[in-house]
Image (cartoon, rainbow, N blue to C red):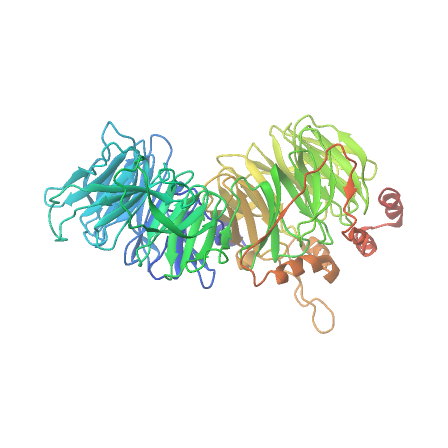
Amino acid sequence: MSSEEVGEITNLEPAAIIGFDGHVIAGLRVHPDQKHLVFPLGNEISIYELETNRQTFLRGHTNTISTVDISPTGKMVASGQTNHMGFRAYVIIWDWQSRKEISRYELHRVKVQSLCFSSNEQYLVSLGGKDCGSIIVWDIEQNIAICGTIATKETTGDALNVCALRQRWTVFVSGGDQNLRVWHIDRDRKRLEVQDVAVGKLRREFTGMCITEDDEVLYVGTMSGDIVKIRLNVSSNPNASAQDKLPVLLGCFGKHNPRKPVGKDCEKYHYGVRDLLILPNGCLVIAAGDGTIDMVQERNVSFKNYNSPTWPQLTSIQSAKIGGVITSLQIVNKTSLLIGTNGCEIYALELQNFKTSLRLLKTCHTNTVYDIAFPYNFSLVFATASHESIRIWSTSRMQELLRIVVPNFASSSIVFSRDGKSIISAWNDGVIRAFTPLTGKLIYAIPNAHNKGCSSLDVTSNGKILVSGGVEGQVRVWKIEPYVQSMIGVLKEHYGPIESVHINCFDTEVVSASRDGSCVIWDLIRLTRKHVIFAHTQFIAAQYWTNGVQILTAGSDKLIGYWEAFDGSLVREVEGSKSGPINAIDMNMTGEYFVSAGTDQIVRLWDYQLGTEVAVGIGHATSITSARYSPNGKFLVTGSSDGGVFVWTVPEKYHIKIASPDKEGKNANRKTNSSDSATRKAVQYRPTRNANENVRELESARSNRSDCQISTCPEVDINAQPTIDPCVDTASLADDTEREEQQQLETRSFHSQKSQIFE
């Protein structure tokens, strides 16, 4: 690499961001062209094309996005963010065609709660959060703020939502905790005129709002589980300067239950009405906090002497239920309903048939992604480990293929066996579990593998030896056989949690990194300590180089260390971060490049020999907790503490360079840099069809499915002996290992030593 290329740092572009931030209220939006979805992902806005599954991103926010809105014609997108306490939060207006920023302003403190465009797209109304509490009207053409005022009275709670009328571009509505107000923009006097909706003694926390096409009626959902109907009494002239009459309450409605007697036949929606929509035929679609989706219509009944302020005015036409609290509700192509939940999932539902049309469109983790793993020499799928679940994803469609659920526990580490027939995972309940990658069925479980929880693991190339690290500081070695899993030995040197264990390419050594400030190199054959690495840091990650002669470490001191595996001496240290610890490192198959990521939310690609940055990726909104290089070296996968999974495209000049043989069987293109021998050695390991048959079948079997298969792990008796499911053909775990051992053993004496332990 030339000196010019060394100084040049390119940008890593995300090929896809797997996920959806369902915690943002009304964060899922359908563009008026009915071809794109717009939703926030951390500090970026994702534009998702429904037909092609392609994603583009709008970048410009400095912190997590809290609200999104699209103009009525779709020409502009507006987004607001949260910020640290004491700082102001940005509102950014984007141009849809160019995907570029039009303007921005920071007039709100800490958080932007809600946004809405006026019907003529001249104004943008923004509502601040509880630390701000103000409403700002921004003139988009002149790029100035016209007016602003406090959103609520001192006797009421915070305002939570703003909604613009469809015909009258100077009127909008705000609602929140015990406040529902109609606002009028006076452009000439640069002020806002407000009228409170007369709701009498009704005390509600108002949530989602929708307005009829003629601006006559406003429907508002409440956290009490009912729907409030308001007549706005707006002027018949859309250009009128002010309203003549006050908006009044028409009724507070619940759902009618015909099975109960009069007086007790009114039902409310559990956990509140979170959002609602008006259909062209006048029906309402109601989304509740318990996951209920209900299509209702009003009954033609009078309730003058009803004994409750909530009347059973609504009758259900059809209903469905999904998991999680519903936060967004949108209609696409006038036939389908898109539902976003706080479980970070997007569902699709046909309006004509609620019972059988429910399907899952997008999903992601809701908690920290602790680890990422690829099958050996196979880049079409990868697995992620998080709280309560392990998920397998397709890298071509960026969709979930399989979900393995273990309730109430978190998976801290995962690894694929070399033959691709099992996923081995470590859990914080101290159990090591192995699953099939096709069905998610439990193959075996090792109860009480570690006393305080299992934090890391790795497996040898033949799949017979498993090394695990625990929170208590012990490294344990296990022998994996088809019908029994037994412990070979316990390695006790650390007194802090084991963050990482990694076995070298010859299956002779394992390095363990601990937060006690040491890395220990263990002899895996004799089960003894060989060397100890000490540093003024808490080691979080350690990994052997491809030929096993050096070890790469990272930790809380923000430094990346190169160490000799022969004697544990320090070779080089480079600064891997400027503002926080490094949580993850990983190399490509040839050892030419490696990736690092940490609390500073930046993904860095490094040249191993030169120790310099060659590419940087920015996009995560929280600290990055895991990173993995794909086997083909063409992309990176990173996971963060908010559950986001980013897939980064590696620039072509940093791809793995493999020598291609010519017709005479000789190498036509040879590498000339210092890692030539390591590259040729890594290329010798070719995947066989048997090794990756299961994971390829996993991709092909679900290529035409839009929903995922969810497998729930049965409970494991921690007092029971380690067992294996006799229905699973696990005898094949030991197949075809002799060929791999022959490639890795260098001498006959070494082979005889190793066979005494492994066989």
Quadrant of res 175: top left
Q: Is residue 134 left or right of residue 657?
A: left
The residue shown at (28%, 42%) is 303
Does residue 594 appear in this view?
no
539 shown above or below 755: above
**Residue at the spot 48% in from the left edge and 46% down from the top edge:** 344
Count the numbered circles shown.
0
Q: In the displayed structure, would residue 361 be above or below residue 627? A: below
Q: Is residue 292 visible?
A: yes
Q: Nearer the viewer, residue 134 or 231?
A: 231
Above-or-below relation of 432 to 142: above
Residue lying farthest front?
261
Horizontal and vertical percent position of residue 582: 56, 37
Left or right: 688, with 356 as reference point: right
Q: Considering depth in this image, is 757 or 179 the residue closer to the camera?
A: 179
Residue 248 pos. (x, y %): 20, 41
Which quadrant is the N terminus positioned in? bottom right
Q: Quadrant of residue 108?
A: top left
| In-image side of 241 versus 325 (left or right) | left
Q: Residue furthest bottom?
A: 663
x then y, percent, for residue 77: 32, 52
Q: Nearer the viewer, residue 355 or 713?
A: 355
Q: Position of residue 621 (x, y in %)?
A: 45, 42
